[in-house]
Amino acid sequence: MDQDLDFDKMGGLVPAVVQDSGDGAILMVGFMNAQALEKTLNDGYVTFFSRTRNQFWTKGESSGNRLRVVSVHTDCDRDTLLLRVQVEGAGVVCHRGTRSCFTEPISLSAAASGEATGAR
């Protein structure tokens, strides 16, 4: 499968969006190179390639909050992955102790949110 993905756009990496297979919540985003994807597909648990540490890391390896892969899909450009998972352990995914990494709101202006034009 990895030979069909476009790892060249981002210097050998593709973004990997992690989604809860049960309720559809987006839990986190990481990056994978071809080897991280292969390890993920073979082991059944999400493994990323850390851009800052320049090494592989399997999510939850030390905490026990592992991400067991249910399915893997790519987008139409074949340069991004969607991994649907079941969270094992206490259900905490973010290093800040929350279920999802997406907990920080950013306010939109009225125009940007569609209120000014009546868009929904």
Image (spheres, helix red, strand yellow):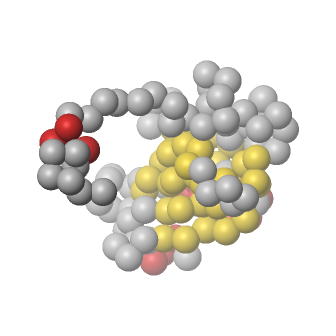
**Near-viewer residue (28 or 45):** 28
Res. 27 visible in picture: yes
Location of residue 21 in the rendering, given as x and y in whole percent from the top left corner: 69, 60
Location of residue 96 in the rendering, given as x and y in whole percent from the top left corner: 61, 22
The quarter in which the N terminus is drawn is bottom right
| The image quarter in which residue 119 lies | bottom left
Res. 39 visible in picture: no
Total marks in image? 0
Location of residue 31 in the rendering, given as x and y in whole percent from the top left corner: 48, 48
**Near-viewer residue (119 or 8):** 119
**Near-viewer residue (75 or 13):** 75
| The image quarter in which residue 86 lies | bottom right
Answer above or below: position of 47 versus 1: above
Residue under the image location 68 percent in, 40 percent down: 59
Answer above or below: position of 111 versus 62: below
In the image, farthest residue toward the front: 118
Residue under the image location 67 percent in, 68 percent down: 71
Residue under the image location 43 percent in, 62 percent down: 80
In the image, farthest residue toward the top: 96
Residue under the image location 78 percent in, 29 percent down: 63
Answer above or below: position of 28 versus 101: below
The quarter in which the C terminus is drawn is bottom left
Q: Is residue 8 left or right of residue 96?
A: left
**Near-viewer residue (79 or 109):** 109
Location of residue 82 in the rendering, given as x and y in whole percent from the top left corner: 53, 62
Q: Is residue 76 left or right of residue 29?
A: left
| The image quarter in which residue 28 lies | top right
